[in-house]
Amino acid sequence: MRYYIRIRVWLCTPSLKLRCAHGLCYPQKTLDDSSHVVFRIRIRGARRHAAHAKNHKCSRSLGNTRRHFPILQRIIEERIRRPINALRLVNAQWIVGEDNHHYYEIILIDLNANRNRKAYQKK
């Protein structure tokens, strides 16, 4: 089963979704080769902790032990913002999900990349 999961993840690797950044009203000149970064991040823990003791809640919330996709996407975005706070987050998209892990692609833009190039500097 583990080999099958690796194959599934490998098959989705060339599908980098850079065009979605162009669709989010960002001009194309800011998305040259030196100004955008794409990360593929894996998150584990699609389940939240279930209470083992007697919890005095309604019966409708007792079987709810999974986290939904918007919550996982927000956790991923918070994790990437901490170490890389100089880049601006454009979009995070879900790629593939398995039993334990979910994979997301995150597009980050360096807004100062064009300012650092010699063509854009003032003489």
Image: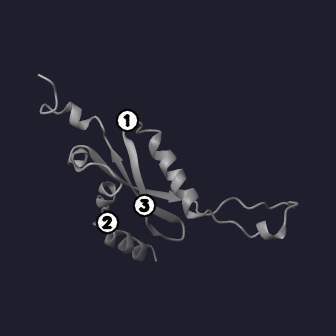
Badge 3 element: strand
Looking at the picture, which amino acid does disc 3 mark? Gln
Which residue is at 34% across, 70% downward? Answer: 12
Q: Position of residue 51 (x, y in %)?
A: 78, 60
Q: Position of residue 116 (x, y in %)?
A: 21, 31
Which residue is at 32% across, 61% downward? Answer: 17
Return the mark for residue 64.
Answer: none
Nearer-N-terminus badge (3/2): 2
Nearer-N-terminus badge (3/1): 1
Using the numbered discs, state the Cα–Cα distance from disc 1 to disc 2 in whole angstroms: 26 Å
For disc 3, the marked residue is: 93
Looking at the picture, which amino acid does disc 1 mark? Ala
For disc 2, the marked residue is: 13
Return the mark for residue 86.
Answer: 1
Asked if residue 85 is positioned above or below residue 2 in the image, the reply reads: above
Which residue is at 55% across, 63% downward? Answer: 69
Asked if residue 76 is positioned above or below residue 65 in the image, the reply reads: above
Residue furthest toward the top? 123
Q: Residues within 10 Å of mark 2 (few under 14, many from 20)?
A: few
Using the numbered discs, state the Cα–Cα distance from disc 3 to disc 2 in whole angstroms: 13 Å
Describe residue 92's horizontal placement relative to residue 55 as left or right: left
